[in-house]
Image: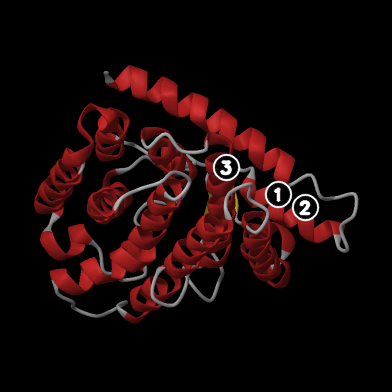
Amino acid sequence: MNQVNIKEILTQYTSEVNSVLKEIMNIEKNALAPGLVKAMKYSLFSGGKRLRPILTLMVAEMLDGDRDSALRVGASIELVHTYSLIHDDLPSMDDDDFRRGKPSNHKVFGTATAILAGDALLTFAFNILSKLNLPPDKVLKIIEVISQGAGHNGMVGGQVLDLEAEDKEISLEELKKIHSGKTGALFKSSILAGAYCANPDRTELTALERYARYLGLTFQIVDDILDVTGNEEVLGKRVGRDDELNKATYPRLLGLKQAVKEAEFNAEKARDSLGPFGERAFLLKQLVDYILVRQS
């Protein structure tokens, strides 16, 4: 399978995820505040790679899990991810005016509505998860791994560490800790939630946790590199923003050349983690390569 094939598959999966998101978000008719729904949908449907729901779907398929449920789980995770992006762009956080080539949510709807749109996306995600057509123990496990990944010991905690690290000199281990929370935690949630749409054993879960850890680091390192070398039109946001905010990044800490090597090292570790799955994991391995060479 080559890079062209994986791009075609990602396009197909993205289309499926978007279809489920459109169905889930068909909520204006009975909405208490239609303007809020408009703000929610603005960010949710402003583009995006849908990598997290695609991971959920790929893992569920690899383990012969419930595909329809995996799509809904993945769509719910995309709601959580979108909430985090809306809040990340706020003036009190990264203060970004653009996201995916469009004005950030708060630039269109105002800061208060943007905060509430994020809140609404987060809570609506768990409403969707509560209605999954899976055995109750699996539903609870999926809710557990997503809430852990999104919460104080995951994405939110990582964001706080990221803010606290601005204007500071930190170690490589501290930087990994930040990004394991800020980025890696929701990757882990996406992957494990996909596994729980099937019947994973302990060996499989351990391998997937390792894969998630190294994939998340690869993604974040590449993200840091693109903030230095990327094209603003392709990225859909300003480059050089990390330096403006004096953020802790891999190029800042290691230099650009060593940051590239670090990304390649973590990518190789991610691929190696999939050993227990043999040929079944070929798509997940191809996804590592795609993330490593992405331009946006």
Label at residue 38 = 2
- Disc 2 residue crowd, few under 14, some 14–19, many 20+, Cα 10 Å: some
Question: Which residue is drawn at the image coordinates 65% and 70% (left, top)?
Answer: 115
Of the numbered discs 2 and 3, the one sitting upstream in the chain is 2
Label at residue 98 = none
Tell how many labels: 3
| Residue topped by disc 1 | 41
The quadrant of the picture occupied by the N terminus is: top left
Amino acid at pointer 1: Lys
Question: Which residue is drawn at the image coordinates 41% and 72% (left, top)?
Answer: 159
At numbered mark 2, what does the secondary structure look like: helix, strand or loop?
helix
Q: CA distance from mark 1 to mark 3?
A: 22 Å
| Residue topped by disc 3 | 69
Amino acid at pointer 3: Ser
In the rendered image, residue 119, in percent from the top left (x then y), is placed at 65, 68
Question: Which residue is drawn at the image coordinates 37% and 72% (left, top)?
Answer: 158
Left/right of residue 85 with respect to residue 63 in the rendered view? right
- Disc 1 residue crowd, few under 14, some 14–19, many 20+, Cα 10 Å: some
In the rendered image, residue 293, in percent from the top left (x then y), is placed at 26, 35
Q: Nearer the viewer, residue 27 or 160?
A: 27
Q: Are marks 2 and 1 in contact (CB under 8 Å)?
A: yes
Q: Is residue 283 above or below residue 288?
A: above
Q: CA distance from mark 2 to mark 1?
A: 5 Å
Amino acid at pointer 2: Lys
Of the numbered discs 1 and 3, the one sitting upstream in the chain is 1
Can residue 146 be seen? Answer: yes
In the rendered image, residue 95, in percent from the top left (x then y), is placed at 51, 67
